[in-house]
Each structure stands twice: as structure tokens, then as C-alpha cells.
Image (spheres, rainbow, N blue to C red):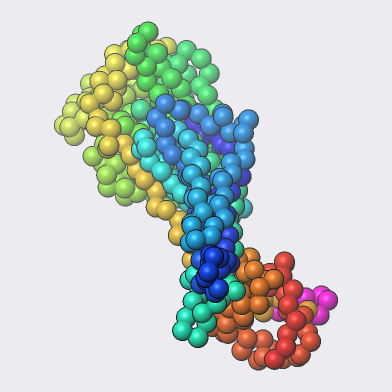
Amino acid sequence: MFVDEAEIYVRSGRGGDGMMHFHREKYVARGGPDGGDGGHGGDLILKVDRRINTLSAFRHISRYIADSGKKGGINNMTGRSAVDKIVLVPAGTIVRDALTDELIGDLVEDGQELVVAKGGRGGRGNTHFVSASFQAPRVAEKGAPSEERKLKLELKLIADVGIVGVPNAGKSSFLAAVTNAEPKIADYPFTTIEPNLGVAELDLDHSLVLSDVPGLIEGAHMGVGLGDSFLRHIQRTKVILHMLDGMAEDPIADFDQINQEMALFDENLAGKAQLVAFNKMDIPEVSARWPEIQAALSNLGYESYAISAATSQDVRPLLWKLYELVQSVPEEETVETMPLYTPKDDPRKFEIYKDEDGDWVVRGISIERAAKMTFWEHSGSVRRFQNLLRTLGIEDALRDAGIENGETVMIGDEFELEWLD
């Protein structure tokens, strides 16, 4: 299975700022607050387009940035929300965080969408902060900051046929024979072994994509010989071609072993369409064994073909039969979706420590996000931020840590405050 890779930078749009404004009208001396909310920032969305079959476009453009929301207006007018930024990718694209390698999503169906960076919400205007005791609030919010991340995209071309078998059964020789050229080579991201991908042209209008899976051995379903890594990718193939080594001591035992390994890994693999090829028929003793092997396979309910990958003997009938089986497999049966990655961190958590300059530093998703959304030039907004410090327990934590009046408190890397108890 050939893996095409690309790394991109994505950033959503930030939310528009809320407005602090009071109604002004002739003969109305004290109009109430009427500052509007900011608009939402645009999401950054990956969307599958079946017309695309490569990640090559990302080699030329690697930065994708969504628009930000507009600022709120007077008379409670909400700022315009930004249009989402949609980036098209081919089916079979696996999305990972480039820094942590965490799986974010697996895009396999045409039209499927995945939000990889959520746009910031619009900041609230001062209308929202009115209360019975606070009727003229000079408070508004900045828009929520954008999200940014680096993503690693991996395209795994879904082969029509996955070729399995014990080591040295002749899988690579068969692939080279039917593709009339050296098969394409691709490094799996999780191993040094190199599987092969080839396209067999049956005629001008018919072709098959075949993938040579490195030889499976006993215990493959548990990762022995890195077998489980390749077994995982057989799940995406439509048909299995099981290659038997005609020179093996007991080809039927090998056949049974490989099928057991696949079933132990995923019981659904046992029901996948499977054709058997008895290889190395150019050797006389192998040819002599064929009737016995064919009868045994027939008794097990499998259709089999006798071939020689080395001489291309009888490979064309086998290819056409594979093509027939591929066409009979419903498209939905080949799709195996990976689970989405869900962040495990609680955004309300925080940590407190002293830096090398002796200043106190507070870090946490919620508190740093709130600091970015605060209008520090407005006293009302500052008081609201102080209330948040109290609500999250940060004030008490700083006291317990021994902070003293006049000491500096850094919120993240950007905001510097002075502690006055």
C-alpha cells in the first residue's frame, strides 16, 4: 500500500471583538449599552473529494488560514461571521498531529468533513453585561483566539487486491510479473520493511491495483515480525490473493496458518473474498503436487489457480478472475474508519511555578484563552478577569504558593500582572 505524505500548517479565524458602546440619540440623555457581538471566526475543514487521488498539491501550498470574524457594531449589530475555509483531500487520507503523532481522523468517504481547527467565537458586546446593579457596563470581550496546528497527512491508496502468504511464497515475483515493470516502492511510516504496490493492466480499459504484503508468520496478529501493522492494512483491500509456496513442506498447513492469523486479528477478514494461487509450477515436483493441493483447497471451499510467477505461466486467467471478484465487492465493505482522537486534557486545569527571573507564571488552556479575550484597557474587563482567577482557584493557589504583594504574575507568555491582595 503506497503512502503519500504531506505536512501542512492550518489556522482557523479568530472571533471578532465585541463592542463597548452606549446608545446616542437626540433628546435621550443616557442611552443604554448597545454594543454588538463580534462574528465567529471561520473553521478550517478538511473535506474528501473523490476526484483527487494524490497529496501532490500540498507540496506547492502548505499553509491554510481561515478568515476572522468582524467586529461588533453599534445598535446591537453583530459582526459578520467568517466563511469556513475548506481544504480538499483525497479519500484514504489519515490526519495526524505533526508534533505528537496523535490520530485526529481518517477520511475515507466522498464528502466527509473533519474540522481540524475550530474558529474562535465572537466576543460579547457590553449589552451582555447589564445587571440590576451594573446598568452601564464598560465591559466587552475580544473575540476568542484562533486555533493553529501542524498536521501530517498520509494517503494510503486502497489496493484492489492484497497479496498474502508466508515469506518466500513468490508474492513480489508475481507482482513484478503482472505489472511488466518494477513495482512502486513505499516506506511504511512504522517500519523499515518496504511493501510493494503495482498496477496490472489487463487491457486498455481494465486494471487492478495490487499490494504485496510482506510475508506473514505465526504470531503476526500479536505483532510478531511486525505482522499486525500489515494485517491492519489488509482490512482496506477488496479481495485477498493467497499465494502458496509450491516448494513448501506443507502448503495447506501454511494456508491454514495465514488464515488463522488474519481471523485472530480481525474476524471480518475471514469473510473477505479470497482466491488462492499455487506458485512455482515451472518446477516439475511442484507441478506433480498440484492435483493433490487443488483437491484439498476445493474441499475447504476455495477456488485455486496454478501459476508460475517466474515464467508468467497462467497469470492472465488469474488476473481476470481477481478483477471479476473486485467488481462484485460492494464499495462500503472496503471502508474501515479509524476512531477520532479526542483531547484528554481538562481546559480548566492550570499550573503555577516561578521562572528564572523569580516571576510567578500561570499556565492553563482556559486562563490563557481568557487573557487573550480581555480588553485590558477597560477596568470592567479587568475585574471580570480577576473574578475568573478566583473561580478557577488560581488566586487561592497563588496564595498557598506564597505570593506576596507587588510580585509579578505572568499569564502564559504574553500578559504581565502585578499581585495586590
Where's residue 236, x and y in %? 36, 37
Tell me: 24 left or right of 245. right
Tell me: 274 left or right of 27. left
Where's residue 101, x and y in %? 56, 52
Nearest the viewer among 263 and 355 is 355
Nearest the viewer among 405 and 166 is 405
Residue found 52% across the figure and 70% down from its top = 28
Up/down of 119 relative to 154, above or below = below
Which segment did they paint magenta?
353-358
Nearest the viewer among 379 and 399 is 379
For residue 281: magenta?
A: no
Residue 169 visible in image:
no
Quadrant of the frame with the C terminus: bottom right
In the orientation shown, which residue stands out farthest toward the top? Answer: 204
Magenta stretch, main secondary structure, is: loop
Up/down of 213 relative to 68, above or below = above
Residue found 49% across the figure and 70% down from its top = 127
Up/down of 357 relative to 91, above or below = below
Residue found 18% across the figure and 34% down from its top = 300
- Please identify the quarter of the rendering in which residue 388 is found: bottom right
- Please identify the quarter of the rendering in which residue 56 is found: top right
Nearest the viewer among 290 and 215 is 215
Up/down of 354 relative to 171, above or below = below
Residue found 53% across the figure and 18% down from its top = 182
